[in-house]
Amino acid sequence: MTTSVYGVWDGEVHDFRRTQSGEPPSVLKGLEDFAPYNKTKAFIADRGFLVFERDTSLVEAFSQYMAQAARESCGRCAPCRVGTQRIRDLLQDFSGGSTGKGILESVEEIARQITDTSLCGMGQSCARALLDALQHFRSEFKPLTPAQAVFQHSFVYTTAPCIEACPSKVDVPRYIDGVKGGKFDFALGVVLDKYPMAATCGRVCVRFCETACRRSAAEGAVGIRMLKRYAADQAITNDRLHFTKSPLQHNKRVAIIGAGPAGITCAYKLLLDGIQVDVFDAQKAAGGMASIGIPSYRLPKDVLKAESEDIVRQLGGEFHYGRVLGQGFTVDDLLAKGYDAVFLGYGASQGTLLGIRNEDPKLAGYASGVDFLLKVHQHVEYGEPFAVHGDVLVVGGGNVAMDCVRSARRMGARSVHLIYRRTVEDMPAERDEVLAAEHEGVIFHCLTNPSGLVVDNGRVTGVDLVRMRQTDRDAKGRRNVEAVPGSGFVMNCDLVVAAIGQQVDKNVLKPEEGIELDRWNCITVNPDTLETSRKGVFAGGDCVLGPLTLVNALDHGERAAASIRDYLLNGEVHIRPARRMQNLLARNRLLADECLQTMPLHKKPVTVPELDAGERISHFKEVDRVISKEMAYEEASRCLRCYRLYSVVTEKQLPRETPAGHREPIFPE
């Protein structure tokens, strides 16, 4: 572990400049691995600063840190807008050898004013470490020596709790700033810089960002997802979601397997950088599991098409539908045909069995959750025959189970029952989805578990169920359950749907292709670069993570595109400084503690309007309505801009993004 020479962290002063004995305490884990073969000299954050090399220039480190603060200032209050720039300039003058009287005193006075009077988290936090340094180690502020000017580099990373909670690391406060300022295209552009599916994610994302939102300590998290959807819908509704085909800037071709969120995002990012892409998918339209597994009442398919197939085609990508990897072609075939790299982004498309007596997927009246939703999708979108009659029983407690019960109601089932072995509070499904299912008349049977199927002449006619009871808590704090002896009973039904999980098809990849799989048939990758065990082959999304979330797949698609670009243009893949910093923050939980600034005035959160429950179960029209412009402004004003800055000072410059072809920002400010 890297230990400090001097610094202040969480108010505790560390000073080992003159001692020769004892080991300085290690405050942060992982700094020694931050940049291999590149010495870490200092670290600066809102909670303090630490210096690890005696020859580090403190004034230059803070000068670059405050320069980033000046760039990030939203400009809405004078202390942050003017003060950060003034401190930056004063420190730069001082580092250059200026002997003006009272420079550091002026810096301290301005830093205190910024901290005490700024209106947002960025302003209130950015000068804290500087104040600690001036108070306890003012003598270390010295003009730069020639050696320090050459051999000291800073990487300053801007983030917030909501950003770090998001797998895609979307700059949430920045796009909320756009909504707040009425710049909806700019707000959308912030999201489009990461992935193309903004309106899609604005409807079905599981909202990790809102879970981390510090506004929840007041009266509830900011409606981050609804604001993303609002900005995206403005562009779609007003026909402004247009992209110009990028000129090919590199003589490289990439094959992408799977037109789901991971594959579409990977294609989108590569095409923007002028790399030719061909997308192969087993279905007859783009979208992957987002298209098949998320019903139209949550995600209209015209919205998904506009953000997947339409955008990729506009950028020059080509689709090859009805092509199933492992059936008719292999990874070997693609590489032999001249593709320079392959991205595997196929989904977890197989259902998981319940593991109960008499279970057989071939039985009439039995379906996995994935197969049931596929049939619903094909019926609603393409008119293929599929009918649901009588009583439907769905087993599971996740989002797929909620999609199944709500779809069964719309398909005309006489009654729909949800079977779950734990309590409603334990359900992994989103709370809004659980409440919606209840409002739509789904009957919940919690602390109930299936033990077998009742079968008559090759058809399921019922399910053997047993009552469960709660026992001790497990390591995660959740109550375990056990069967209640003698509590078995039968529930008659016409269709049982097993919606307890999905899995990856083990027949997609052949052993001789040299791509390592884990025991769940998921592809093994380098978690930072998404490289597989085979050179030139990358993978991401459900085929790596298992059946996770849409935003996790979007993140993998973007990161894989960056790695593929590195590989194609440099022959090797680098771990980016931002990724290293994200790992460091997560390992040390630097954003897990309370960082709420001055408690704001309470503002009631905006509620998304929706169709009446009695009306909506007769069709698959979208349930959630669009908020008004006034509602968007009001909700955006609740954001606290909880930005924090983290800086690593290194001896040598860290590798930057591989220069791509020049392109204008998407929807610039």
Image (cartoon, rainbow, N blue to C red):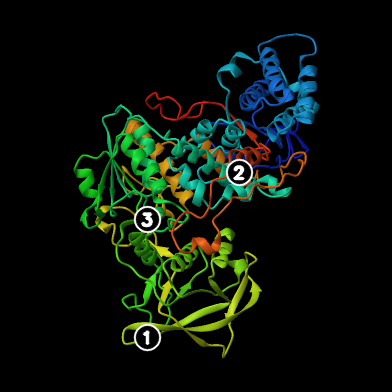
Q: Give the residue pinned by disc 3.
A: 347
The residue that appears at 22% across and 49% down in the rendered structure is: 332
Q: Amino acid at mark 2?
A: Cys
Q: Amino acid at mark 1?
A: Val
Q: Which mark is residue 162?
A: 2
Crowd rating for badge 1 (residues with CA inside 10 Å; few <14, some 14–19, many 20+): some
- Label located before the other in sequence (2 or 1): 2
Q: Secondary structure at mark 1?
A: strand
Give percent across and percent down for residue 371. Answer: 36, 66
Please, is residue 371 above or below residue 608 in the view? below
**Cα–Cα span, label 3 and label 1:** 32 Å
In the image, taking residue 82 as reference, residue 203 lies left or right, namely: left
Give percent across and percent down for residue 361. Answer: 34, 75
In the image, taking residue 394 as reference, residue 638 lies left or right, namely: right
- Label located before the other in sequence (3 or 1): 3
Q: Is residue 471 visible?
A: yes
Q: Give the residue pinned by disc 1.
A: 455
In the image, taking residue 393 as reference, residue 320 lies left or right, namely: left
Q: Secondary structure at mark 3?
A: loop
Whether the residues at callouts 2 and 1 have beta carbons within 8 Å, the answer is no
Q: How many marks?
A: 3
